[in-house]
């Protein structure tokens, strides 16, 4: 019986000591002696016996929150205050009596809990304005952590803090934390928010997941972006870029898009330009080769499709370069045919067994190539003239357009030299000198 009485006396004594210590903390807080309160609450919080005592963690949150206000550059104080308040709510959430649940926070009108949110948010704004994006990102992330605490415990009716989430994403992106940016931008995108200011956000997500070879998420946000911003032309570019270095897959994607949208000039032009590079780039091609000739035929159709949709200077310029390459190939074939003719010239005058004169090999082919070259020169002149008419009217050409314009002028010089009209050739040569 004496042992039981002794245990009861010890328990009462322990409770009395705790009550006195927590009251001392509250007294210091009421007198704004936060430094003194900190040393006392730290002792209580460090005691394993108080790990489940919500009152300790609430008072720690109050003390650290007030210290953080007096020392705004000390990020550890605000973080410790938030951790303490989160722990308080976690412990109190198990209280069955709703009237007693969160009582200490309720009695102060949840002032500390809301302070933790607003302090971090305002600190994030200040750091953002100072272009300290890394610190601003931390502040907005902490603000969202505090917001989740408020929302999860039904202290606010707002369920999503769009502004803080957006700025957490922006500051993450500005501080090169792309994973963080994707996390917060993804939260906005998943809410299907379609404000016109958010289109870049969806594009970021598509590009981010494309770069990280996450095809599922890339397609997810590409589909969302298309749905919410159907007039944004960049979605097609991302679709094509997603094919990577697989040329066959890339060409197939162009054809798929053009089948769905046959009047899309930008895609038609890009397709023609890439097909041009594949046709004439890389290893030297042999004129007359079946595959090479088929590629050139396909290229002609691709460029003409772009011109038919919109006969711009650029589209006409690409056609002039294509025809110029065809002329070069025909000239190579003509030279080969002439070499064959020269090699057999000695035997060309000999009489056959029947008395007929042997015709030199290559003569017929030479005439065929000369005729084809003449026709191609007329073609290149027609497209060059169209491109020239458009480029010459521009008063502020971009550098790449100026280079294309020079090539068009050279095409016209070559044409008039071929036609043996030096005066006209000199006219376009003079124009070249003005660029």
Image (spheres, rainbow, N blue to C red):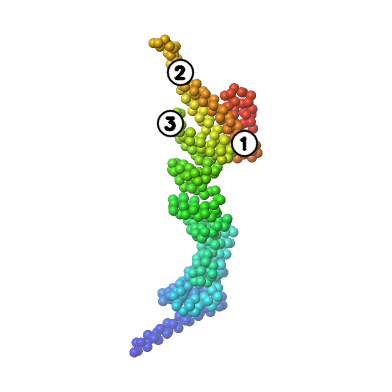
For label 1, the residue is 391
Q: Is residue 265 above or below residue 216?
A: above
- Residue 25 visible? The answer is no
Given this view, does label 3 or label 2 mark the residue nearer the observer? Answer: 3
Disc on res. 341:
2
Q: Is residue 148 above or below residue 203?
A: below
Disc on res. 100:
none
Left or right: where 213 falls relative to 426: left
Q: Secondary structure at mark 1?
A: helix
Residue 387 x %, y %: 60, 35
Q: CA distance from mark 1 to mark 3?
A: 36 Å
Q: Is residue 235 above or below residue 121?
A: above
> Residue at coordinates 51% horizontally, 47% vertically from top-left?
236
Q: Quadrant of the C terminus?
A: top right
- Residue 95 visible? The answer is yes
Q: Is residue 331 above or below residue 111?
A: above
Circles 1 and 3: CB atoms closer than 8 Å: no
Task: Count the labels in the image.
Answer: 3
Q: Nearer the viewer, residue 52 or 219?
A: 219
Q: Which residue extends farthest bottom?
A: 1
For label 3, the residue is 290
Q: CA distance from mark 1 to mark 2?
A: 43 Å
Q: Secondary structure at mark 2?
A: helix
């Amino acid at each position: 019986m004496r042992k039981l009485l002794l245990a009861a006396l010890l328990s009462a004594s322990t409770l009395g000591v705790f009550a006195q210590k927590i009251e001392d903390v509250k007294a210091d807080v009421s007198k704004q002696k936060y430094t003194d309160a900190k040393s006392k609450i730290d002792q209580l919080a460090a005691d394993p016996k108080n790990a489940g005592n919500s009152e300790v963690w609430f008072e720690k949150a109050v003390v650290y929150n007030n210290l953080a206000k007096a020392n705004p550059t000390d990020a550890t104080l605000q973080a410790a205050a938030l951790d303490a308040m989160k722990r308080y709510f976690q412990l109190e959430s198990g209280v069955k009596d709703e009237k007693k649940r969160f009582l200490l926070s309720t009695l102060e009108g949840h002032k500390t809990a809301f302070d933790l949110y607003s302090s971090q948010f305002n600190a994030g704004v200040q750091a953002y304005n100072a272009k300290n994006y890394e610190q601003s990102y931390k502040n907005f992330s902490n603000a969202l952590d505090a917001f989740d605490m408020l929302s999860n415990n039904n202290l606010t009716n707002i369920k999503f803090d769009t502004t803080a989430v957006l700025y957490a994403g922006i500051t993450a992106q500005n501080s090169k934390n792309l994973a963080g940016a994707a996390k917060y931008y993804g939260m906005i995108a998943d809410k299907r928010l379609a404000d016109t200011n958010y289109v870049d956000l969806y594009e970021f997500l598509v590009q981010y997941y494309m770069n990280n070879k996450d095809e599922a998420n890339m397609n997810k946000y590409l589909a969302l972006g298309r749905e919410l911003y159907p007039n944004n032309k960049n979605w097609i570019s991302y679709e094509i870029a997603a094919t990577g270095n697989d040329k066959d897959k890339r060409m197939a994607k162009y054809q798929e898009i053009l089948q769905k949208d046959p009047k899309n000039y930008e895609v038609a032009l890009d397709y023609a330009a890439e097909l041009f590079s594949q046709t004439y780039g890389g290893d030297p091609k042999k004129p007359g080769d079946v595959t090479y000739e088929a590629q050139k035929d396909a290229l002609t159709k691709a460029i003409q499709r772009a011109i038919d949709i919109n006969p711009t200077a650029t589209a006409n310029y690409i056609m002039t370069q294509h025809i110029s390459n065809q002329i070069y190939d025909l000239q190579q074939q003509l030279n080969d045919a002439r070499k064959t003719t020269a090699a057999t010239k000695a035997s060309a005058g000999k009489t056959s067994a029947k008395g007929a004169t042997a015709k030199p090999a290559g003569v017929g082919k030479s005439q065929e190539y000369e005729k084809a070259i003449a026709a191609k020169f007329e073609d290149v002149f027609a497209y060059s003239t169209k491109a020239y008419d458009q480029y010459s009217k521009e008063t502020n050409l971009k550098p790449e357009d100026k280079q294309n314009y020079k090539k068009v002028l050279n095409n016209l010089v070559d044409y008039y030299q071929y036609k043996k009209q030096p005066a006209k050739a000199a006219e376009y040569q003079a124009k070249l000198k003005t660029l």
